[in-house]
Image (cartoon, grey):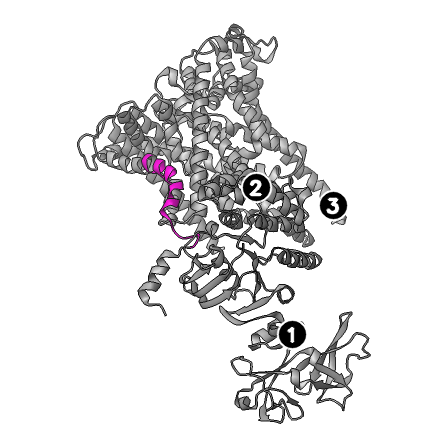
Amino acid sequence: MTAEIDIRNVSKSFGALTVIENLSLSIPAHEFVVFLGPSGCGKSTLLRMIAGLEGVDEGEIFINGVRVDPLPPGQRGLAMVFQSYALYPHMTVRQNMAFGLENVGTPRAVIAGRVQIAARMLEIDHLLDRKPGQLSGGQRQRVAIGRAVVKEPKAFLFDEPLSNLDAALRARTRIEIAQLHQRLRATMIFVTHDQIEAMTLAERIVVMNNRRIEQIGPPMEIYDRPATRFVAGFVGAPQMNFLDVRSAAAGAAGLEVRLDETLTVLTHVDPAEAGRAAVLGVRCEAVHVTGADQGDVVGVVGVLERLGDRALAHVHLATGQSVIASEVAQTRLRVGDRIGLKFDGDKAHLFDAEGAALPLWRAP
Amino acid sequence: MTNRSDASARRRKAAGADAPDWRNALFVAPYLFFFATLLVFPLFWGIWLSFHKADIFTSGPFVGLGNYIRLFNDAVFLRSVGNTFYFVFLTVPALALLGLFLALSLNSNSRLATILRGLFFSSSVLSVTIVTLIWRFVFIPQYGLLAAIYKLFDAEAPSFLTDPSLAMIAIAITTIWWCIGLPMMLFLAALQQIPADIYEAAALDNASRWRTLTSITLPSIRRTFVLVVIIQIVMQFQLFGQAWLMTRGGPNNVTRPIVLHIYDLAFRRWDVGLGAAASEVLFALILAAAMIQYLMSRSAGERS
Amino acid sequence: MSGRANSRSARRGIGDHLILALVLALSIAMIAPALWVIGLSLKDNHELMANPNSVFHPPYVIDNYVNILYGGGVIRWILNSLIVSVGLTFGTLLLSSLAGYGFARLNFRGRDILFIVVLFGLAVPEQAVIVARHQIFSLLKFHNTYHGIILPGLSNAFGVFLMTQYFRAIPKELDEAALIDNASRFKIFWKVLLPLTLPAQATLGIFTFLLSWNDYFWPLISATEKSMYTLTVGMASMQVNFAQSEGVGFLMAQAVFAGAPIFIVYLFFQKYIVTAVSGAAMK
């Protein structure tokens, strides 16, 4: 019992502030989709509109072909997990989980059965008679999920559920949510600002910024082929290196861009777009440290971050710009070293002045 | 894709969880019913009555401002206004300052302080009848507690409640004994809001106890002080029980407050219109006094 | 700091002692009348008449208290006060909770304006409406009835104000979770939010009870028949009819008898009463 959700031309304003503008999105059944974006981009609002907690000013929302936007939240067959769990403090875990089913008149026996199954699945069956105040953060989170699971909803809505957990717990719960999806195969919509959560959990990511959808696609597509500069910079840590382009000319394999007197990068971007090239983006794993004379450009190591599995070198160029390069963990580099940087042109991205990514090119 | 009328129809139908719904008003309706019938309506009805010569069942003929004119020509009424002001003057500063003093002295966690705080607040939970009963007997000449104390010093206690110059003072003392709890509690709450690190900084700055009090503590609770004064003014303007039960407003109407006059007019002489007029005058006085106090404190605050 | 303590301690000692002495003097002034009254209540009436100072010496008897239970309408008055106060408390809690939830959590047209109007109601003193109320109740024949004494108190805005503030402080997500759980607005009120307001209910309940129990003016003019007197009115009427020291002991015993229950309530619920009273002042 799962849902296909269809959002058509939806808009919402709070007073004079337009929060969502003419947004359309289709979510097929069983999919785990993540709404990813910075604070204020509209992702939570969109989720709440699907849930019915916010009204839709214009447009429609359909679940399984049935129009739901006029319906109150309880009648859409959805379940939501809140950032702050929103457990009823004076009820036991069992009562918390049963509340929703009681309100629709489900028979006692059915409720008891579902609660038991869900509790066992989430490993909270020994907590059923405790009150939320007696539980740890992670346990409360599981109860919140359990409350959603027992309702056997058409879709699960998660509103930044991991934000209140510490790092270790966050990682563990992430995996549990992934397993939950594998197990239930229900449609799940997950809202977060954390790109790691998005990359690891999503089948598709909807990247939002400033009330618009920037890109929709599977995680690797978002990572490897960002549609806009925003997406390129938002996904992937550390952030992609961005360098201003001085001029561009057509080359054999693609557009050759000149970044300053000394540095030219050979990309695989369609040469026809020479006029639009404004910014070059290249991830740190595509920037290699070489000897001072063997690279595309010379730089000085400013800061060296050792992460354990690799090292990140922040290199200052003569132009004043800073580039992050990825190095092996045991690198012998030191602060102040004069080194060369080699850019991996076929992994480079180009963006125009508005931030749109320029298309790649295949040589004929 | 969609034309305008379709869009607006959809807009009307799609309601969020928070949309205005007249059914939600049903929650406040029961209270509002009593509010409207028992507060709002009588408020305006009272004003209306004050313009009529009314008795308990009918509102009688319209007399315009006649009642008000009669009031201001009534020596007893004017006397009662004066008495009320005098009473407020006696009690409010004393309550505020004494309350402040007690709050400052008892602002600690010691066992003694806690017990004493409870003691000073306990009188506030008694009803006016019990309080006046107690203090009438305290003041009774020859047999009263005060008389006994005076006898310790070989003196004769004056008869407070029958002495025109002392009667109001006796009522004031009774009232202060009765009402000291609230100001003290309000000041205590305000004192506890002052963060501890301010005191620590003052200590490091070598401030003396007195200096700390005047430069740090008192300014921090200025707003509460104003609040206490306003509340007490409003409360003490409504003096009734103590005067009615201890002296009946006498001797010679020296302790007759406005509310007693209202009671007399409306519920003893059944001159309901006149009584209503008197109550409107009282209402106006209370509002004015509270307003003035508030504005005075505002401007003083802005100056500093 | 410690270096200064020595030079300061002498001065500190005097200042502190003075304050302590003053506070203790005031404390004695506070408690003396009450102790004296209790003493009087434990003396035989005739003995007191003969020698007022006998209050300071034994013997102490409890005859006065025994007489209370047999004579006078004190028991009846206490019953009346109880019915009125409990009735008003219950009514206030119900109305204020419903209205508080409505103002704090629900949206309807005119909500904000209505709330401000209610707030203004706090500023209206009793006397401004009492004459009109009396006439209205005369016409409705509500005098000398229980509902006649209880009803005016239900219009008090303090409870609504308190409950609204309290409901506002509860996180909105609970409402949202319950909405998604298909609960009606009333169910959210009754099953989810109301149980979380118990501290406020206790505070408001005790405050209302106290205020009602001690109310004098309205019961005085509305309950004019002896059998309908509340305790405050009844006791006041007794005060009127006494000659100098005759029955003083008995009178004092009545005072103690009447005051003791409230005092006991105070001792137990001190925290709530103080909270309520301070909160009332914050309007």
Q: Which amino acid lies under the numbered mark 2 shown in the image of this protein?
A: Val
Viewer-proximal residue among A252 and B263: A252
Query: Which is nearer the N-term, disc 2 or disc 1?
Result: 2
Q: Quadrant of residue A234?
A: bottom right
- Report the predominant secondary structure element of the magenta stretch: helix
Q: Quadrant of residue A2?
A: bottom right
Q: Secondary structure at mark 1?
A: loop
Q: What label does residue A239 carry, if any?
A: 1
Viewer-proximal residue among C17 and B135: B135
| Subunit bearing disc 2 | A
Residue at (78, 69) in percent of width and height: A308
- How many angstroms separate mark 1 from mark 3 (CA)? 60 Å
Residue that badge 2 annotates: A110
Query: Is residue B90 visible to us here?
Result: no
Q: Which amino acid lies under the numbered mark 3 shown in the image of this protein?
A: Ala
Residue B168 horizontal side relative to residue C32, left or right: left
Region in magenta: B16-37
Residue that badge 3 annotates: C5
Image: C100 above or below B60: below
- Check disc 3: other Cα within 10 Å, few if <14, some if 14-19, many if 20+: few
Q: Secondary structure at mark 3?
A: helix
- Residue found at the far front of this picture: A1
Q: Secondary structure at mark 2?
A: helix
- How many angstroms separate mark 2 from mark 1 (CA)? 50 Å
Image: A245 above or below C119: below
Q: Nearer the viewer, mark 1 or mark 3?
A: 1
